[in-house]
């Protein structure tokens, strides 16, 4: 529930005391479950009907945009903690996934989610990469719960990534659905791809210094994997299915823009103390400095709580 409170209503001691490993686990489990919402559109398809080649291509294009935007979000997240390690992680991630693809291509009998052969290899790589990148996100959430404003800041980050998980779940589901995988399996694998967020959040909260030092390489590695798979697998599939470069470019750009727009909106509303202030018309380029401030009165903030 989002409750409104005037700034300073909760003391720092109250905020710190509220954070426990159990609360971090429960919140991040709910956050990871949000990924399943990305598969909802595919339950609306007539039973047993596959996506047409055109829609399968556009679905892959949407997945490309989401994964590219998520990749650069991770690069920006790791940059303040060690830009050199982030870049090194990018190269290592791309090299690793290229090597893994080469190994999988040598095995024609690969099967995954009722798929075999090339389709199984591609979907396995995508789901595996999205699962691996969830480890980095989970570490970031766990670290955010530490510090003086840990509860407020941690809940804000959890909420933001929870919403962010919906399009990521859509990306996983679209890749699976484009190969004819049933909606229930799309839902299952979407949620499974985000469960590592919960697995790593609690240890990173308890051992914040260790995870903070490892985070730059981890997010860079995950970003390198996602960028490589977009250009090596998903984008060629999108062009092949849609047969219209403009439609593919539009779908990928719009999905990336939507994800980046959400990230920037959350960043703009984030206060230094970890609270989320109420949006005003000024945030949308409308009104003056005093719009929504009650004529100079105290500005309201939001605390995220169960």
Image (cartoon, rainbow, N blue to C red):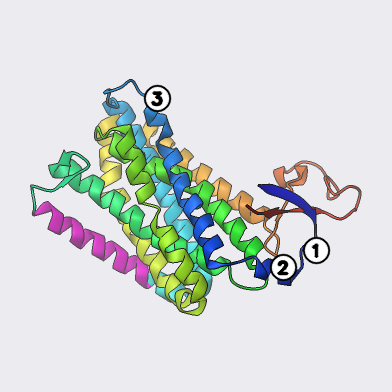
Q: What separation in Å lies between label 3 and label 2 (alpha carbons)?
A: 45 Å
Disc 2 designates what residue?
Answer: 14
Can the viewer see residue 141? yes
Residue drawn at (45%, 57%) of the image: 72
Residue 208 to residue 93: above or below: below
Could you say which disc has been placed on residue 291 in the image?
Answer: none
Give the left or right position of residue 130, taking residue 124 as reference.
right
Q: How far is the residue under mark 1 from the one under mark 3? A: 46 Å
Viewer-nearest of labels 3 and 2? 2
To which residue does mark 3 refer? 44
Q: Quadrant of residue 85?
A: bottom left
Position of 220 relative to 162 (above/below): below
Name the residue located 60 percent from the left edge and 58 percent from the top edge.
Answer: 155
Q: Nearer the viewer, mark 1 or mark 2?
A: 2
Dot 2 surroundings within 10 Å: few (below 14), some, or many (20 or more)?
few
Query: Residue 83: horizontal and vertical position, in percent?
Result: 46, 73
Element at label 2: helix
Q: Earlier in the sequence, mark 1 or mark 3?
A: 1
Magenta region includes residue 90: yes
Which residue lies at the image location 42% right of the left edge and 46% below the top edge?
Answer: 168
User: Is-magenta flag for residue 289?
Assistant: no
Between 52 and 116, the residue placed more toward the observer is: 116
Mark 1 burial class by Cα count in 10 Å: few <14, some 14-19, many 20+: few
Residue 128, position as x, y percentages in the image: 29, 54
- Label for residue 8? 1
Q: State how far apart marks 1 and 2 are (Cα).
A: 11 Å
Q: Main secondary structure of the magenta part?
A: helix
- From the viewer's perspective, is 81 left or right of 236? right
Residue range in magenta is: 88-106
Q: Of marks 3 and 2, which one's residue comes earlier in the chain?
A: 2
Residue 227 shows in the view: no
Q: Is residue 262 left or right of residue 293?
A: left
């Amino acid at each position: 529930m989002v409750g409104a409170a005037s700034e300073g209503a909760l003391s720092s001691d109250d905020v710190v005391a509220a954070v426990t490993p159990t609360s971090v686990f429960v919140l991040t489990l709910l956050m990871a479950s949000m990924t399943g919402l990305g598969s909802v559109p595919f339950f609306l398809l007539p039973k047993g009907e596959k996506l047409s080649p055109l829609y399968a291509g556009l679905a892959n294009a949407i997945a490309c945009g989401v994964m590219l935007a998520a990749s650069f979000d991770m690069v920006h997240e790791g940059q303040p903690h060690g830009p050199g390690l982030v870049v090194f992680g990018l190269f290592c991630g791309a090299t690793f996934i290229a090597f893994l693809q080469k190994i999988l291509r040598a095995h024609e009998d690969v099967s995954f989610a009722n798929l075999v052969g090339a389709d199984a290899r591609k979907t396995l790589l995508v789901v595996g990469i999205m699962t691996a990148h969830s480890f980095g996100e989970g570490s970031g959430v766990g670290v955010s719960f530490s510090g003086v404003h840990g509860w407020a800041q941690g809940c804000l980050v959890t909420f933001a990534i929870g919403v962010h998980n919906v399009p990521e779940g859509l990306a996983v589901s679209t890749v699976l659905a484009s190969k004819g995988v049933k909606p229930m399996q799309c839902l299952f694998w979407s949620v499974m791809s985000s469960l590592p967020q919960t697995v790593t959040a609690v240890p990173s909260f308890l051992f914040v210094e260790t995870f903070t030092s490892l985070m730059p390489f981890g997010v860079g590695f995950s970003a390198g994997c996602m960028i490589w798979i977009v250009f090596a697998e998903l984008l060629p599939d999108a062009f092949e299915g849609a047969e219209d470069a403009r439609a593919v470019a539009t779908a990928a750009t719009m999905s990336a823009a939507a994800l980046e727009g959400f990230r920037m909106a959350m960043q703009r509303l984030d206060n230094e103390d970890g609270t989320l202030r109420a949006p005003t018309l000024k945030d949308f380029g409308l009104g003056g400095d005093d719009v929504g401030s009650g004529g100079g009165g105290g500005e309201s903030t939001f605390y995220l709580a169960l």
